[in-house]
Amino acid sequence: MAPYTYFLDAAQGMYVFLQAVEYRPTRPWELPQTLYIVRPNGTPMNLGDYAFPSEDDVWGAISPDRTRLVIGSHRADDQTAACPDVGVDLFDTTTGQRTTVHPDVPADTGYRVRRAWWASDGTLYVNYQQRPCNSGSTWSDPAVWAYKNGSWNRVNTPGAAVLALDLGGGELAVVEPKDADGGILYHVDKGGNRTEIAEGVTEIADIPWR
């Protein structure tokens, strides 16, 4: 195959990437990109075409057990929609079957998932925003929702959050928005008390117990 446009993720011999349908050197993410997954047997599987409103929206992640792939449900024909509806596409990495999911949303409300990530127990987390479909409306502050066993639950962070993980026992790891270079990571105990850990944080992951 021709060189990829964007490499998204890899896990134990499995690779996920985007390949431009028609490449251009400037703002290539706006043009259709074909999503491929390559399994350990080396055969690429075509999972369909995507196009993205910004380079920050280009991401994908394989689940810890390698059975699922998640990517934002951006399409070339919906980039200029007045009322966006961008959830996440979940793929079965064996069959390529796609399911699009998102938290519940009120009527006449646009929504978008800006990022998704996995916990070690297989819970999917998403950075989620809403806005009314009327002209001039603004996006809500980012919130984190968790998807497990087919159900969505909002993570109870102290305020706006771009990343979060449930650490168990009522404790959370939370990244609050700061600037384009990343957010501020806090540990939040079960009483809601925050301890700052680091700045400039752009990723988050837990380490499974061994």
Image (spheres, helix red, strand yellow):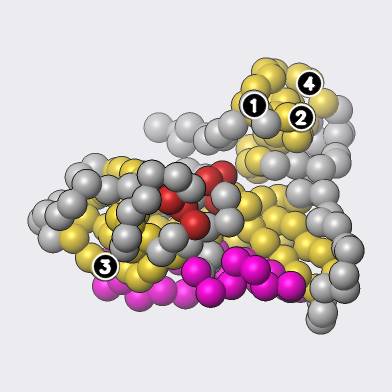
Task: First in sequence, mark 1 or 4: give its number.
Answer: 1
Which circle's residue, 2 or 3, is located before the other in the chain? 3
**Image quarter of residue 95:** bottom left
Circle 4 SS class: strand
Residue bearing mark 1? 181
Q: Is residue 95 magenta?
A: yes
Q: Is residue 8 left or right of residue 37?
A: right
Give residue 96's position: percent from left, percent from top. 31, 71
Q: Position of residue 164 (x, y in %)?
A: 67, 41
Using the image as rendered, state which of residue 64 and residue 110 is in the foreground.
Answer: 110
The answer to which of marks 2 and 4 sits earlier in the sequence is: 2
Residue under label 3:
46
Q: Is residue 35 above or below residue 198?
A: below
Which residue is labeled 4 in the image?
195
Under tag 1, what secondary structure?
loop
Using the numbered discs, state the Cα–Cα distance from disc 1 to disc 4 in whole angstroms: 20 Å
Q: Give me the residue at 31% from left, 63% from top.
A: 21
User: Sequence-wise, which precedes: disc 3 or disc 4?
Assistant: 3
Dots 1 and 2: beta carbons under 8 Å? yes
